[in-house]
């Protein structure tokens, strides 16, 4: 969690939830894609809860 107070904030639009399901090679060769990696994978999300940020 962090706080950003710079000029690049979405002042005129609402923010939404984005879930990303991909694999990158940043943790060593054992985590990289190979020929045996399935082309398509599925991510099942059971529950998501979004809380309103506290006013400051």
Image (cartoon, grey):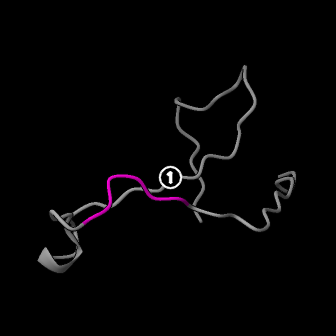
Query: Height in image: 16 above or below 37?
Result: above
- The quarter of the picture where residue 23 lies is bottom left
Q: Main secondary structure of the magenta part?
A: loop
Please report the residue visible at 57 percent of the width from the left and 61 percent of the height from the top: 43
- Closer to the camera, 39 or 43? 39
Q: Which residues are magenta?
A: 37-42
Label 1 Cα neighbours within 10 Å, binned few <14 / some 14-19 / many ≥20:
few
What percent of the width, then of the height, locates residue 54?
86, 57
Judged left or right of residue 51, residue 8 is left
Q: Quadrant of the N terminus?
A: bottom right
As drawn, the residue found furthest toward the top would be: 12
Q: Residue 38, relative to residue 40: is it above or below? A: below
At a point 32% along the width and 53% down the height, the residue shown is 39
Q: On screen, 19 above or below 2?
A: above
| Whole-percent x, y for residue 19 in the image | 58, 52
Q: Which residue is mark 1?
A: 20
- The answer to which quarter of the image holds residue 9 is top right
Residue 7, percent from left and from top: 53, 29
């Amino acid at each position: 969690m962090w706080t950003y107070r710079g000029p690049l904030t979405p002042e005129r639009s609402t923010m939404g939830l984005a879930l990303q399901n991909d694999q990158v090679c940043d943790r060593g060769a054992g985590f990289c894609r190979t020929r045996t990696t399935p082309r398509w994978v599925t991510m099942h999300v059971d529950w998501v809860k979004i809380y309103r940020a506290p006013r400051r």
